[in-house]
């Protein structure tokens, strides 16, 4: 969509400018801190980048409550929905039972070409189910994968699949590698990303049958495949994309989260008990927090649902405003750089290779 | 074996006493710090508990080098072996190609009733393969499991299987639960240990097919089964035994290890760069190390190979003397409390239940 903007120039002069805007839908009801933190983050994104048109889906009265205190920009639309997806709802039932929820309605806006991307901190399962039914898969993609960006090392890496599927075949592993590589190039700017297979050892024969077969197929189909990455070295940042099945990936991501929370609590208690000086406490806390930040992926712009035929970004349930803001910027970048088109091209050549070798 | 000891009483008087001794074999060549740290730890164990008779297996001349500086007790035997298992050796070939290695010969001493237990920090795969061939499985046990004790929370918990098998069936999960529970009772003194199934969510329908079926079978066969434990809450210490497949378990254990090393390095560097006072550096290092200790399972007496018909304790490759010493004490406790007999009894009743429900 194009819009006329009145922009203030560096010398204080004003000028009208024709600018291309992009409408992004944000699920105002999704997440532990919804709607307030979600809306705060969304408004921050719009205030930094006025080329974003914002649609908030959810209960209008609740959204309005969070908007009154803020300086609501004119580019914000509210799309009222009467239902809400709860974490206890079965994802497979959401489309049928909650068609007027902020998730289903929000994704439907992309489906109807009324918006370019959808961002939500709501139920991953529900978002996945609704995306698959409303947007479908990119041509050639067998299974979508959840790619989590872990900001460790120089450029960070993507772990895929972090939980979209509970069981995966070698073909899916190859496609996760292809899609996550495209994400690394488009969103993180990494040219020709290297790929590793998460495993219990570096030898080709390590792991379950699926992992042994996946190793073999990836070696043939992914030119930048570097072999197995032992989980011990997961955080050393040796490759840009790490592929695993969704059951292992989800376990790892949740384990990391629980571990960070546990160690944080423990260190805080020890600081409270053993350190008297407020200055020392602050210094130690900052050192410790910085060491831990490398793993706090939830801050880094959400998780793209790779393989779905549309830009859908899933944020962590406990996302603060900053994470929502970053997710909106990531969504915009996905659209601008045509991540979907690029995945489509790569998948079609990967599919030929897979067919050749299986 | 019984021995006459000359013991010094509290009043300085001496008395001969008939004491029951127990011979434990320690693989002097296994581990990153072998033989020096292994021998140091083994001698410490013997000096604390003189009822332990020690046999060290390995290259006699290398063992003697480490012994010369120490006060070698009379109860130490050296069983010379001419071969050494390398980490690159294929476990399945070790029995055939390295029959005179410290691992194979050491386990053979139990097989020949010349010792009660075997302790090694060498190749897990080789120890597992040799144990299965020489000692066999406890009657009724389908697959042995590696139980790692994680000392978090009040009593700590055992994670089983930590990597003995790469694929497991529901029947194996039930047996891991039974065997690891016996370990918790015999070695950690926990009565009626509670059991959880590691999973990506608490609902019965979560996880792969094997996990859904395992949940169902464990509910029927394990009276103290508490359901799924989400990996996020792994370290909360809510149950005494956590069961998972060996691929996930091994990934988790190695991940935790790599992670601790990574965060340790990171925090040390930040302390070096940002803290000038040596006192402050020391204080924070101690706080941080104490918070991390909960996860450093390798210190806590090694990993029992559960389900093998003999007491075999596997230590971490980088075990310091303290870990070896603790592993020897754990081995002794396993023998004294007849862990094998207890596992045998429990497995036989578990097998009836499994047969009833499958």
Image (cartoon, coloured by chain):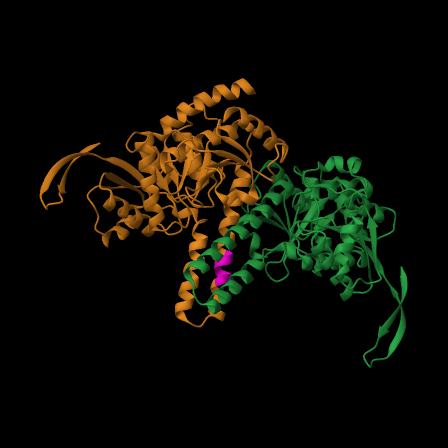
Chain colours: A orange, B green
Quadrant housing residue A99:
top left
Q: Residue at x 46, y 56 (%)?
A: B269
Q: Is residue B103 visible?
A: yes
Q: Is B31 left or right of A128, judged from the image as shown?
A: right
Residue A194, percent from left and from top: 47, 33
Q: Which of A305 and A198 is in front in this view?
A: A198
Residue B82, percent from left and from top: 80, 43
Q: Is A341 left or right of B195, judged from the image as shown?
A: left
Q: Is the magenta stretch mostly helix, strand or loop?
A: helix
Please give the range of residues in magenta: A262-267
Quadrant of the frame with the N terminus of chain A: top left
Q: Is residue A81 visible?
A: no
Quadrant of the frame with the C terminus of chain A: top right
Q: Nearer the viewer, residue B317 or B100?
A: B100
Q: Is A222 left or right of B62, judged from the image as shown?
A: left
Quadrant housing residue B291:
bottom right
Q: Is B199 left or right of A320, judged from the image as shown?
A: right
């Amino acid at each position: 969509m194009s819009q006329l903007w009145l922009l203030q120039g560096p010398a204080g002069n004003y000028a009208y400018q024709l600018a291309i805007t992009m409408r992004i839908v944000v699920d105002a009801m999704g997440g532990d801190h919804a709607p307030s933190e979600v809306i705060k983050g969304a408004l921050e994104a719009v205030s930094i980048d006025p080329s974003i048109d914002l649609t908030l889906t959810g209960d209008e009265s609740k959204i309005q409550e969070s908007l009154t205190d803020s300086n609501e920009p004119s580019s914000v639309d509210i799309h009222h929905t009467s239902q809400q997806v709860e974490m206890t709802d079965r994802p497979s039932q959401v489309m049928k039972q909650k068609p007027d929820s902020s998730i289903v309605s929000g994704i439907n806006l992309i489906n109807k070409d009324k918006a370019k991307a959808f961002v939500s901190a709501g139920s991953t399962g529900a978002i996945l189910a609704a995306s698959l039914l409303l947007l479908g898969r990119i041509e050639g993609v067998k299974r979508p994968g959840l790619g989590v960006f872990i900001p460790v090392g120089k450029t960070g890496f993507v772990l895929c699949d972090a939980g979209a599927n509970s069981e995966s075949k070698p073909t899916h592993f190859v496609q996760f590698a292809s899609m996550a590589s495209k994400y690394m190039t488009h969103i993180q700017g990494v040219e020709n990303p290297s790929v590793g297979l998460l495993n219990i050892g570096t030898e080709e024969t390590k792991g379950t049958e699926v992992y042994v077969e996946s190793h073999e197929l990836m070696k043939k189909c992914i030119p930048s495949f570097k072999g197995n990455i032992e989980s011990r070295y997961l955080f050393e940042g040796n490759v840009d994309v790490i592929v695993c099945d969704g059951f292992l990936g989800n376990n790892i991501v949740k384990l990391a989260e629980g571990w960070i929370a546990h160690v944080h609590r423990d260190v805080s208690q020890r600081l409270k008990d053993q350190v008297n000086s407020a200055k020392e406490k602050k210094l130690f806390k900052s050192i410790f927090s910085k060491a831990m930040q490398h793993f706090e992926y939830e801050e880094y712009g959400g998780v793209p649902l790779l393989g779905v035929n549309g830009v859908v970004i899933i944020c962590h349930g406990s996302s603060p405003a900053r994470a929502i803001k970053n997710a909106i910027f990531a969504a915009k970048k996905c659209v601008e750089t045509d991540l979907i088109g690029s995945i489509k091209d790569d998948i079609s050549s990967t599919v030929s290779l897979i067919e050749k070798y299986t």
